[in-house]
């Protein structure tokens, strides 16, 4: 058990990412405790009320956070594969663009951008081709789902042009 | 009325032209989406849920049943021809099936998978029809504490009994349970964890969470792996028909697979994977051609595929009779019921028998349709497999967001979709299972209700939870399912368990 100070390469160092997970779990537990304390006094006459279960879950989450620290310290987490973050950013940007443009630009344009950005994340970077294609495809989907299946999908300038 | 009359009545409902059409659309969409690489039945059902929004409950559930069975069928095609199984329950099929396809016997492999699935689905659906009334009768004497114990058992088996870490399974489960607390408390009407945001008062939508975790999380994860070069699709050469020896070697594994898969699916004990592994092991031991195992033995496709479909029907037993989802797919189906205000369980059999029996009967019909649809159309499904990755995932993202926008076109809902997508991605990177989050979210409020009812009856006395023999036994089984794997893993015997891990289904 020579942790830390000895330059022992055989021992893995504490897994910092896993320690972050433990911290996040502890924070969630903390938020739940705070919320429960705000509700307290509401427990019914049998001492069982809306606070009982969140309290129990928060206690369990704290326990799991401690267990995670323990495993992180021992390096028990599995090896992680190398992650390329570029593609992840493309897709997240696509989702963010759709989220922000949906009300203004309507379903087809917003979702067309998501389509093109996702394709870019998977290596298809010719945006001048994929964006128009995505918009046309999303428009076709909009017609099917909103006109045939009566799903309420937000319409924008492009949709109003035709319907 | 007895089961037989109920089933006949159900068949009459399911055979109405509109319902037949819904079932046909369901199986076609289910197979088409299920065939796509990387998409399992859970995601298939979640993605296609919005298609059913505008139908009446009966039609929607019938379409749902078709989607569910179609997704299972589609997955086996992917694993035979591509060797990247779209669902964890098809991993075993890929072992022998892909070898057969490489040896130019892809046709018979697909045929034995399809016919085996049909046979298993038929027997298991009939099994469901005949067992369900007994479980319903039993469930009617269940009180809150028995239900609570049953749900605890489901929580344990879904999260920590299988997979490679008890810690990570339980963490996923409790993240799901914590998310389940958001919104208005159903018993007292108090808002919990909603931080004054009106969008959170209704709680978190199960479909939003499931689509985000499965579709967006998975897409992000695959994108982050970088370009690994195209996957090799095995062309289907030769006849799709099975020879006489193929039949002779297939029929026993079909029946054995069904016998293994159905009880495992029907128990509140997790997904279809376990049955497929057990069936594979059984076939390997019983075969007369041991030298073929590992090189494309038809028994190794026939048995596990039958087991896979039999347990898919089996998971409907706890879902329909007890309202207890034991897989992520079942959890999403439960969400599908809930959008019509229907709560599956013993009462649904009493209050809405046409619906339940129509659903069971349409499973039989969907099964038959799949057999007819699958063998001749195999070329079409193979074409779907060869969609290039950028277009495939762009399409998946489009349809993933479509469902959420259709249900609730708000920026906040899309923000949650993005946030849970990132959570799902992070969980995949660190090896956390996804299914427990979804099951925790949907089952959490139900378990809480039962627990609080039980404790209110006993005036806060916790010993009431173990005071009934049924509840005690269920809790003891749950404790064993938690502790035994911990010991196995601590002694280095965990590999078997992680092989049985339920990652997607």
Image (tube, coloured by chain):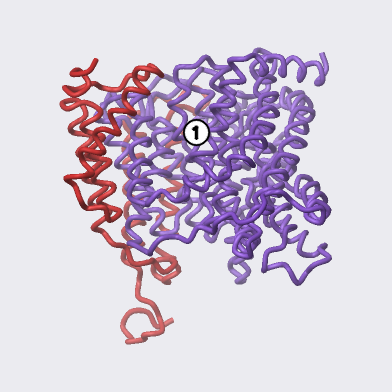
Residue B103 image point, x, y percent? 63, 65
Residue A143, percent across and down? 32, 22
Q: Which residue is mark 1?
A: B442
Relative depth, front residue between A157 and B162: A157
- Asked whether A43 or B433 is in front, the reply is B433
**Which residue is located at x 79 percent, y 46 percent?**
B259
Quadrant housing residue B469? top right
Q: Is residue A72 left or right of residue B242?
A: left
Q: Chain B rendered in what hue?
A: purple
Image vertical order of residue B56 relative to residue B426, above or below: above
Specify the quadrant that holds the N terminus of chain B: top right
Which residue: 40% across, 81% down? A11
Which chain identifier belongs to the red chain? A
Residue A76 vertical placement versus B238 (above, below): below
Location of residue B501 by image quarter: bottom right
User: Which chain letter goes with mark 1?
Assistant: B
Q: At x 31% / y 83%, what residue is drawn?
A: A5
User: Exactly how many numbered labels are in the figure?
Assistant: 1
In the image, residue B334 lies at what x, y percent? Answer: 54, 29
Query: For the residue carrying disc 1, how many other residues have a C-alpha within 10 Å: few (<14), some (14-19), or many (20+)?
Result: many
Residue B455: tell me if it is visible.
no
Secondary structure of residue under mark 1: helix
**Looking at the figure, which quarter contains the C terminus of chain B?**
top right
Query: For residue A132, what is the image quadrant?
Result: top left
Q: Position of residue A154 (x, y in %)?
A: 26, 22
**Does the image show residue B440?**
yes
Q: Residue furthest front?
A: B238
Query: Is A25 above or below relative to B33?
Result: below
In percent of the image, x 62 and y 15: which residue is there?
Answer: B17
């Amino acid at each position: 058990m020579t942790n830390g100070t000895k330059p022992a390469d055989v021992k893995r160092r504490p897994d910092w990412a896993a320690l972050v997970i433990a911290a996040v779990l502890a924070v969630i537990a903390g938020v739940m405790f705070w919320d429960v304390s705000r509700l307290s006094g509401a427990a019914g006459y049998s001492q069982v009320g809306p606070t009982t279960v969140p309290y129990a879950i928060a206690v369990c989450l704290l326990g799991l956070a401690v267990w995670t620290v323990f495993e992180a310290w021992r390096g028990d987490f599995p090896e992680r594969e190398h992650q390329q973050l570029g593609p992840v950013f493309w897709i997240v940007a696509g989702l963010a663009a759709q989220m922000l443009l949906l009300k203004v630009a309507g379903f087809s344009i917003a979702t067309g951008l998501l389509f093109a950005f996702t394709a870019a994340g998977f290596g298809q970077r010719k945006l001048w081709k994929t964006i128009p294609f995505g918009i046309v495809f999303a428009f076709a989907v909009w017609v099917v789902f909103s006109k045939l299946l009566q799903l309420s999908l937000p319409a924008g300038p492009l949709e109003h042009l035709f319907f | 009325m007895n089961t037989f009359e109920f089933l006949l009545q159900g068949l009459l409902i399911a055979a109405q032209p509109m319902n037949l059409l819904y079932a046909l659309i369901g199986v076609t969409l289910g197979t088409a989406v299920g065939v796509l690489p990387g998409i399992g039945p859970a995601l298939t059902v979640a993605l296609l849920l919005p298609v059913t929004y505008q139908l009446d409950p009966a039609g929607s559930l019938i379409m749902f049943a078709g989607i569910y069975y179609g997704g299972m069928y589609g997955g086996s095609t992917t694993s035979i021809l591509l060797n990247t199984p779209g669902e964890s329950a098809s991993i075993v099929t890929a072992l022998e099936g892909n070898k057969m396809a490489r040896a130019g016997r892809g046709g018979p492999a697909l045929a034995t998978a399809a016919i085996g699935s049909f046979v298993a689905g038929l027997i298991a659906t009939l099994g469901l029809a005949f067992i369900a009334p007994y479980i319903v009768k039993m469930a009617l004497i269940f009180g809150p504490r028995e239900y609570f114990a049953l749900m605890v058992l489901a929580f344990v088996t879904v999260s920590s009994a299988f997979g490679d870490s008890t810690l990570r399974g339980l963490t996923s489960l409790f993240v799901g349970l914590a998310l389940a607390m958001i919104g208005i408390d159903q018993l007292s009407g108090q808002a919990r964890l909603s931080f004054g945001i009106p969008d959170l008062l209704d709680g978190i939508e199960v479909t939003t969470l499931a689509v985000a975790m499965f579709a967006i999380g998975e897409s992000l994860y695959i994108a982050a792996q970088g370009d690994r070069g195209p996957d090799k699709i095995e062309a289907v050469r030769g006849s799709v028909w099975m020879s006489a020896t193929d039949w002779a070697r297939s029929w026993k594994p079909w029946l054995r697979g069904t016998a293994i898969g159905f009880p495992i699916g029907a128990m509140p004990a997790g997904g279809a994977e376990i049955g497929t592994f057990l069936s594979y092991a059984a076939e390997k031991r019983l075969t007369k051609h041991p030298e073929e195992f590992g090189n494309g033995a038809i028994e190794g496709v026939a048995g596990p595929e039958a087991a896979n479909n039999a347990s898919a029907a089996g998971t409907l037993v706890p879902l329909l009779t007890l309202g207890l989802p034991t897989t992520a797919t079942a959890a999403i189906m439960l969400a599908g019921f809930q959008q019509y205000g229907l709560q599956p369980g013993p009462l649904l059999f009493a209050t809405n028998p046409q619906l339940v029996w129509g659903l069971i009967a349409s499973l039989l019909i969907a099964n038959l349709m799949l057999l007819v649809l699958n063998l001749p159309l195999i070329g079409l499904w193979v074409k779907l497999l060869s969609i290039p990755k950028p277009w495939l995932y762009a399409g998946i993202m489009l349809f993933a967001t479509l469902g959420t926008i259709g249900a609730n076109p708000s920026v906040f809902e899309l923000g949650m979709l993005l946030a849970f997508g990132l959570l799902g991605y992070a969980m995949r990177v660190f090896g956390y299972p996804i299914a427990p989050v979804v099951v925790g979210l949907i089952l959490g409020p139900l378990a809480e209700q039962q627990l609080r009812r039980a404790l209110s009856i006993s005036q806060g006395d916790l010993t009431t939870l173990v005071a009934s023999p049924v509840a005690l036994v269920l809790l003891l089984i749950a404790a064993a399912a938690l502790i035994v794997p911990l010991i196995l893993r601590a002694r280095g015997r965990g590999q078997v368990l992680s092989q049985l891990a339920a990652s997607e289904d």
